Amino acid sequence: MTTRGWITLAVMALLGVLPPLFFLTGNPFYLDLATRLVILAIAAVSLNLILGYGGLVSFGHAAFVGLGAYAVGIPAHHWLYTGWGDWATMGYVQLPLAVLACAVFALLTGLVCLRTKGVYFIMITMAFAQMIYYLIVSIEEYGGDDGLVIDTRSQFAWIDLDNPLQLFGLAYVSLIVSMVLVRLIVNSRFGMVLQGAKGNPDRMATLGFNVYVFRLVAYVISGAMAGYAGALLGNFTTFISPEMMDWSRSGELMFMVILGGASTTVGPVLGAVVFIVLEEVLSHFTIYWHLPFGLLLMAVVLFVRGGLAGMFGRKED
Amino acid sequence: MDFSLLVIQGLNGLQLGLLLFLVASGLTLVFGILDFVNLAHGSLYMLGAFFCATLTYLFGNFILALIVAVPITGVIGFLVERFVARPLYARDHLDHVLGTFGLILVIDTLTHLIWGPEGLSVPLPDWLRGQITLWGDTVVPTFRLMIIGAGLAAAAGLFWMVNRTRLGMLIRAGASNRTMVSALGIDIELLFGLVFALGAAMAGLAGMLIAPITEATIGMGNGIIITAFVVIIVGGIGSIKGAFIAALLIGLIDTLGRSFLDDIFALFMSPVAAENSAPAISAMLIYIIMALVLAFRPQGLFPPKVR
């Protein structure tokens, strides 16, 4: 196995073992931190599919996360206040709804976004995310600017999401599944075309592939996965607000991918770990933690090529 | 629909459009000439507002503060170009976005450190505080008219500079072929710095003009920058004429949509349904327009001719 393969295993093993240990030894706070970390890592993994492997710089990924969270919050809201049946709180309804809503949103916006390239694509994905942001803000029934409290977490027959350990377990397993999924996609024929189009879209088109369609499918898959992460995030925080889809959230997701190493399996996870831990440590010391954070971000962009994963071994894995 | 309300909202839309143009012109110039995506452009808009607020208290005169604060913002823009943008020119757009995203965090936090978390109000002189009667009982605040006047003057000045002066000629030449311009012995790095400073000064001016109405607040630039992106996408990135037309279009559509969409909807649906759906649709209106424009013209309405 390559060096990076071992690192992937080590990171995932630590991530799986340490947080429950903290919880069982009376530090539940660290389990909470790890749950948020793992959920954001799923979103970063999904972003990596289009940003890293597809070369599509999407600056609106937080919209999918937010939309996924509202797909949990809105049915739960109607269940409590407008007499929707118990089905509205079922995890089997909410999670697929989150995935489906984001897939549809990704399809509709992707149809337009992917007609553009380069900087137009960056700005238009950002603008569509802002559109959803303002849409949610304008709907007073769902709290508008103030956000929405989720009174009931998604109900499952076999696990209880009110139990922090079980919620973490679900998020952790989901992260592994999403990493495996992205890896399978990337190594498939479909993934090869996607990566080929990143390097040279004209060549792929000349070879007879409809690059637009391949990219659109990847965009929809990525958006749907981010929506799933959003549904988990809603279940974790039990409070959702439009702020979740602010464009700085999208920027943070991009930063995680780039910091950890784009187009690597473990990169987005590493990036999420470093991001969340740094945020936690810095904000502990000073309320002005955005200052060192911003400087670090600029330093990483200027001086670190290939991210953290890029420091160990090349290509593959 | 009430005619005098239509006129007033039309003026408000014009005002928003002109402010958007001031912000978008810098973005589109910097992108057109330097091929650089500057997310932190909104932070310069915010800095302009804060400088103007502080100087207004210092001088006791808003107009004087405005005149001094514009070049200061320009200098900040020049420094940003030198120390942040220049090392990033050779990189791809993704690095521009991340680097300037980091810069936003730095500038916003420094602003927080220097001016504190509260917004700063900007007091206006008495002669700008009143209202002007257009006819009957239709009145507009004097200051809003001043914003429109100043915005039009700045736009005219920018067009004159770009189309009629030597500096403008160099800027246009740099936009179409920068290698050729530097081969002809022009100090291209200085030119880049000046373009950045010019864009920063325009954005700063927009921030100064809006500050007496909204206060100078941290993060005020992060909202307008997205709308400015919509403007330059619709107008065609790199085109000043496109930015001007698109800015007025977006400003008017957004303002009029927010005030009259429920009336328009009520013509063909029940008043309750119109009341409920209008806010959501008007919040999304400019993005729907953007999507429509891009669906037919992916390069925007007025793409620059050669790149």
Image: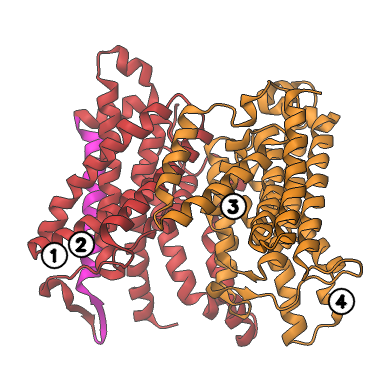
Circles 2 and 1: CB atoms closer than 8 Å: yes
Is the residue marked by circle 3 packed among few (<14), some (14-19), or many (20+) residues within 10 Å?
Answer: many
Check if mark 3 and mark 1 are on a common chain: yes
User: The residue under label 1 is which amino acid type?
Assistant: Tyr
Is the residue marked by circle 4 packed among few (<14), some (14-19), or many (20+) residues within 10 Å?
Answer: some
Q: CA distance from mark 2 to mark 1?
A: 7 Å
Q: Between tags 3 and 4, which lies in front?
A: 4
User: Mark 2 = which residue?
Assistant: B53
Viewer-proximal residue among A113 and B262: A113
Identify the hue of chain B.
red
Q: CA distance from mark 3 to mark 1?
A: 44 Å
Q: How far from the left and from the top, in percent, is residue A140?
A: 58, 79
The answer to which image quadrant residue A185 occupies is top right
Q: What letter labels the chain drawn in orange? A: A
Circles 3 and 4: CB atoms closer than 8 Å: no
User: Mark 1 = which residue?
Assistant: B57
Circles 1 and 4: CB atoms closer than 8 Å: no
Q: Which chain does the residue under circle 4 lie in?
A: A
Is the residue marked by circle 2 packed among few (<14), some (14-19), or many (20+) residues within 10 Å?
Answer: many
Q: How far from the left and from the top, in percent, is residue B88?
A: 43, 29
Circles 2 and 3: CB atoms closer than 8 Å: no
**The magenta segment:** B136-165
Q: Secondary structure at mark 1?
A: helix
Instruction: Identify the residue at the far right of this view.
Output: A157
Left or right: residue A191 versus residue B295 is: right
User: The residue under label 2 is which amino acid type?
Assistant: Ala
First in sequence, mark 3 or 1: give its number: 1
User: Mark 3 = which residue?
Assistant: B291
Q: CA distance from mark 2 to mark 3?
A: 37 Å
User: Mark 4 = which residue?
Assistant: A87
